[in-house]
Amino acid sequence: MSSESRWLQRCLTPKAALPRQLVLGAAALSWLLMLGAWCALSYGGLVPAMFLPTPVDVVAAGWRLAEDGTLLEHIGASVEVVLVGFAVSSALAIPLGLFMGSFRLVQALLDPPVNFIRYLPVTSFVPLFILWIGIGLEQRVAVIIFGVFFQQLVMVSDVCRGVSKDLVNASYTLGCKRRDVLLHVLGPASLPGVLDTLRVTIGWAWTYLVVAELVAASSGLGYISLKAMRGLQVDVIFLAIAVIGLLGLLTDQVFRILRMKVCAWAQ
Amino acid sequence: MSSESRWLQRCLTPKAALPRQLVLGAAALSWLLMLGAWCALSYGGLVPAMFLPTPVDVVAAGWRLAEDGTLLEHIGASVEVVLVGFAVSSALAIPLGLFMGSFRLVQALLDPPVNFIRYLPVTSFVPLFILWIGIGLEQRVAVIIFGVFFQQLVMVSDVCRGVSKDLVNASYTLGCKRRDVLLHVLGPASLPGVLDTLRVTIGWAWTYLVVAELVAASSGLGYISLKAMRGLQVDVIFLAIAVIGLLGLLTDQVFRILRMKVCAWAQ
Amino acid sequence: MGAVNLETAPARLQVRNVSLRYPTPTGGTFVALDKVSLEVPDQQFAVIVGPSGCGKSSLLYLTAGLNEPTEGEIVVSGQRVTEPGPDRGMVFQGYTLFPWLTVRQNIEFGLKRRGMPPAQRQEVVDHYLDEVRLRPFADNFPKQLSGGMMQRVAIARALANDPQILLMDEPFGALDSQTRHQMQRLLLRVWEHAKKTVVFVTHDIDEAILLGDRVYVMGARPGRIRQIIDVPLARPRPEDVELAPEFIALKRQIVDLLHDDLHRIDP
Amino acid sequence: MGAVNLETAPARLQVRNVSLRYPTPTGGTFVALDKVSLEVPDQQFAVIVGPSGCGKSSLLYLTAGLNEPTEGEIVVSGQRVTEPGPDRGMVFQGYTLFPWLTVRQNIEFGLKRRGMPPAQRQEVVDHYLDEVRLRPFADNFPKQLSGGMMQRVAIARALANDPQILLMDEPFGALDSQTRHQMQRLLLRVWEHAKKTVVFVTHDIDEAILLGDRVYVMGARPGRIRQIIDVPLARPRPEDVELAPEFIALKRQIVDLLHDDLHRIDP
Amino acid sequence: GTLSIGHTTWVGYGPLFVARDLGYFKQAGLDVQLTTIEESSLYMAAMASGKLTGTASTIDEILKYRSPQFCFRSVLALDESAGGDGVVTANGINSIKDLKGKAVAVNEGSVSMFWLSYLLKQAGLGVKDIEVKNMTADDAASAFMAGRVPAAVTWEPNLTMVKQKKAGQVLVDSRKTPGVIVDVVALRCDVIDKQPADVKALVEGVNKAVAYMKAHPAESAKIIAKGVGGYLSKPEDVSEALKGVRFYDTAGSVGLMGQPGKPGPLKDVVSLANETWSVIQGKKFSVGYDDLVDTRFLKPAH
Ligand SMILES: Nc1ncnc2c1ncn2[C@@H]1O[C@H](COP(=O)(O)OP(=O)(O)OP(=O)(O)O)[C@@H](O)[C@H]1O
Ligand SMILES: Nc1ncnc2c1ncn2[C@@H]1O[C@H](COP(=O)(O)OP(=O)(O)OP(=O)(O)O)[C@@H](O)[C@H]1O
Ligand SMILES: [Mg+2]
Ligand SMILES: [Mg+2]
């Protein structure tokens, strides 16, 4: 059997591992294909410019905004909203989630409202948030919190509930009191899962940015994309979406690396 | 030690199981507390009626809409959008996810775009969808698909990737060809995880309903909640949100039961 | 701790008429242990063998205070057991090292909980690292160890706490037979240095005879002590003791006892 | 299948100068098997013992066609092995029953893949259900079985396919010693009826001598065959063969061989 | 033929519903499909992609979207806001001049912004003199009533609500600015070219409906309540809301929009809109009157 046909066979074999270069190559190819399809559609004139900007249009829009420094300002404003919202949400959800995962009673009390609320549309809450919270940064942050808090809570409590009971028993026989168990066993044991949760949910936080900036924002990527919709400036809409996507990828990777560094002990 | 203090102790013990009645009681209590807090805030006059409807207001709004049959019509329209979108998305995501989870090459090709796209804000795509797709049911369905498809894809492929390699090896030694493996091993082995994915993502599908019905719906729960914002009909907004939440819970439970019935063989 | 001092108690461990019943899902009760009594004098190495499901683990968990007997009482060093404590160290069948702590930190865990000063802690840990021959691995994380090494750390961790009694639940059950053999030798050596009272549960009759001063043979459904067999082999036991005629005779006796235990799990 | 027919081949299984090397993460290569050769005549029960990591599983996987040797070749019934096939049945150490299939369906799996008509299938399955004494459990799912029962199903499943050779990788490694003992007896009985060629990997020296016609003792780093020991014990072997002097002598010989294997995994 | 028209929930589009439900369009062989979309960028996107043939909207709003690639023209005027839009302020802000330096909740890209900048200009101020808090007109009303902003630009029914709840005062409403907030029906240029008869039927149907509404206010309110729905689902509410708008019959349209070659006073609104959006969007708008208005279908009254 020739070496090429063997590789082909490996590619077609379920669950066969492939060499790193091939995987990286495929990933690169996939980006190129996306870019190529975009170019073909926009430059090829298959889709009118009004509906789909060309890559150069988007870069030009980015350049235009970058030149007068407003792009950075928009990014800064959005990053602030997402990070503050995400930090507050995580700071509440992680301890509460650990409690939920540790104590059956807390879980029984919190499960019903949490499972109900996490399926509610954030968008519908925007007018209510204005009434209850106002129109400042708090309101934008509240949208992000509402978007991720309940998901985090459920995920963290699942992680904590998944910690082996044997570890807890072992810690008792080593002299742990009930109080110690949470701090010295369930907490550290949940850490990798908690970081995974943070990684996934920070991605979601970015998707709520546009909703968060519906109200009273004067800068931000969601704000410029909303503004660009009035007048159908598809190049700016694309730019804003792309920057949000890239920031989402970036934060995702940050947590991926953090997870690897902090939890080197986990398999 | 008295029997009461022993129960109290169990409640305070991490990872201690509690009797079913206590858990159900706590869940009931939790619903009652929520209702109580709502009554206190609304009837107690702590929050003006303009900002927070009373439970009776919401029920009355529901009754008003139910009487002329429009509530059912709205529910029907929304259920159609969500279910069609969810069905199309699942029909695409499940096989593709299984391929992604089975073949490293497919995963390498799809991972970059999927991971980028799933962090993009759906809301920003609404005007683009109108440009590309139009304003019919297709557009609403497209929003739902966009909201859940990429999440489903990632989750299903994780499930499939998690299937033990040993099962695949065992099937080879029993005479399975590569083709059979997907159909007869990876598929059935992934079923419980796939159903779990469907359960979680149908909940998410509901949260995208309001965004889906931004455009050109003449009925639907998202549509009435959007319309109710004009004139601050908080009772109708609450009604719509509550019905969406309940439908979300309902579909969640349907998949929970389906999972138990269909995958009785899974632990 | 609701400790009742019974200074006159002669044995290190007294199990008095202990029964344990679990409620079954169908509303009945399942008798896991039925009026079990035994006494283990100080520094004795007691071994419990018996078919799967006869309640061996249950008995150890009760002794550790991780569960409460339905009837009867367990007394360790004259104190009635009501909760887990560091005076009863335990080594579990599964791997229960804390994966986020290094070997050294795992062994230190109980000492830290007790508030032992760092210098003294280091001394104790070093001693037990040497005892289990793991000094070069002090700073490794559990995932970097083989199964045998992990159980050695677990033994060191339990012993470092200087318990009055060491409970071991099939600690070598998951190891391959060569490793297992080495571990038995190592345990004997460590035990001869530490002079602890040990209660050791195993399925392996060779292991029981090789290690024990006395073997308790249990029967299932309900869990009961069927026979107590003293092992008259001199210590330290030579390498080839398993080939000695007394050993073989004892083995035959126990094999027969277990064979005619009609309460089989498998048909 | 790139099958080369070597009609003249005398033995059922021929392993010819097989080496297996894995690339290490640091860029080097790790030699798992180094020029291993062996021949197993038809209907022989061959056992391989050796320290952990010496390449026992690797050799079975190569024979099954689940992996390819770096050098050398493996020939089964005169056909060079290039891919897995139902002519080489395998029983794995872990539980590899298909959890979504009943006991009957698991045993039927390979027959179905081959397209055997239902009536004939039923007959074959019933025969093997009787052989492993699991007729009453035919419609149970694997999760309702004990570990020993699961391995019996795995054996029946492999045998039902009527393979030319049966590969068994520590099939009883995870069972407790009583169950293990029953399983060994059952395997001997089934093997005497089925008259298959068996290659059996184990850590347990008693098991090796009890079952085997010939024992291959392997050494680690690199994985090599260190010694071939024929077992002259007559068949069927009596219940207490383990206490026979020839048995004990063989055991001592193998223990010594393994003991002075300096390539230990643990220090 | 068929014309599909997108619009928001607004009583000013009542004549379209009346004409449709009374069969005025049908009589002339025209099928009009009315689609509610609350967000202007979305119905404009729908028109751009050809899924809608036209929209009913204020002329300043649609001006922003006009480009050589996206061609549409207004073929008739429907109504002007006469009290339907307003600026609400907290006590202590008693004139537009007092808004200087204050936070004002207003929808940045919408008719509210256009109108506010008109008011500011009249008072000798500019958009730069106030602090704009961007949000939808409904959110602006919520924010104002919740005391989050001292001033807001919004519309009915929020103005009435502010008065009822005594949450503040309506400082100015659109009665004071006749001919500034004007709703028009705009159609895609290709549709105008291909379906002149339908456009004519549209104009005539609306003309008849306006006449009917004048003659039969109660029946009209019922029709509109049924068609518009939402906060206007009760005929009483519609009657109330109708007080805030003034409808144009064909003669009125001609008076406002002019005749081919003879632009009417709407030309000033268009130039004002060009000016306003140029300032606010930071990008030059100079849409010509003839690019935005097509008066060929408006026959002067006999
Ligand atoms: N939490 C529980 N609820 C109900 N039954 C239980 C529970 N824990 C154990 N049992 C039952 O009690 C019996 C004794 O269990 P135990 O684990 O002590 O047995 P064992 O002798 O340790 O078995 P093995 O050798 O398999 O470890 C078993 O039949 C088991 O099914
Ligand atoms: N995919 C792989 N990549 C790199 N090294 C591997 C791989 N699979 C196995 N090895 C190494 O090859 C050696 C032989 O592995 P193998 O599983 O055959 O040993 P074994 O004799 O079956 O051990 P055990 O008794 O523990 O089952 C081991 O040192 C193992 O670490
Ligand atoms: Mg046990
Ligand atoms: Mg192996």
Image: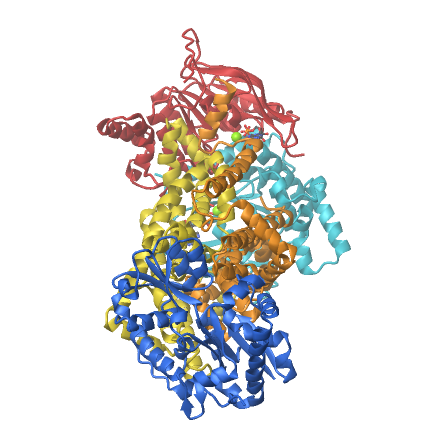
Chain colours: A yellow, B orange, C red, D cyan, E blue
Ligand 1 image position (quadrant): top right
Residue at x-position 50% and y-position 65%: E241
Does residue E205 appear left or right of residue C160 in this picture? right
Of residue C115 and residue E221, the one placed in the foreground of this image is E221
Of residue B222 and residue C251, the one placed in the foreground of this image is B222
Image quadrant in which you'd find residue C28: top right
Residue at x-position 61% and y-position 81%: E25
Query: Do we see residue A232 in this rendering?
Result: no
Residue A94 in the image, given as x and y percentages of width and height: 38, 43
Q: Residue furthest top?
A: C8
Q: Residue furthest left?
A: C119
Image quadrant in which you'd find residue C240: top left
Residue D205 in the image, given as x and y percentages of width and height: 51, 37
Of residue E159 and residue D27, the one placed in the foreground of this image is E159
Image quadrant in which you'd find residue E62: bottom left
Query: How many discs mark residues in the rendered view?
Result: 0
Residue A109 in the image, given as x and y percentages of width and height: 49, 37
Q: Residue furthest right?
A: D119
Of residue B45 and residue A58, the one placed in the foreground of this image is B45
Residue at x-position 34% and y-position 47%: A263
Residue at x-position 29% and y-position 37%: C138
Above or below: residue D127 compared with residue E168: above
Query: Do we see residue B76 in this rendering?
Result: yes
Above or below: residue E7 compared with residue C165: below
Residue C10 in the image, given as x and y percentages of width and height: 43, 9
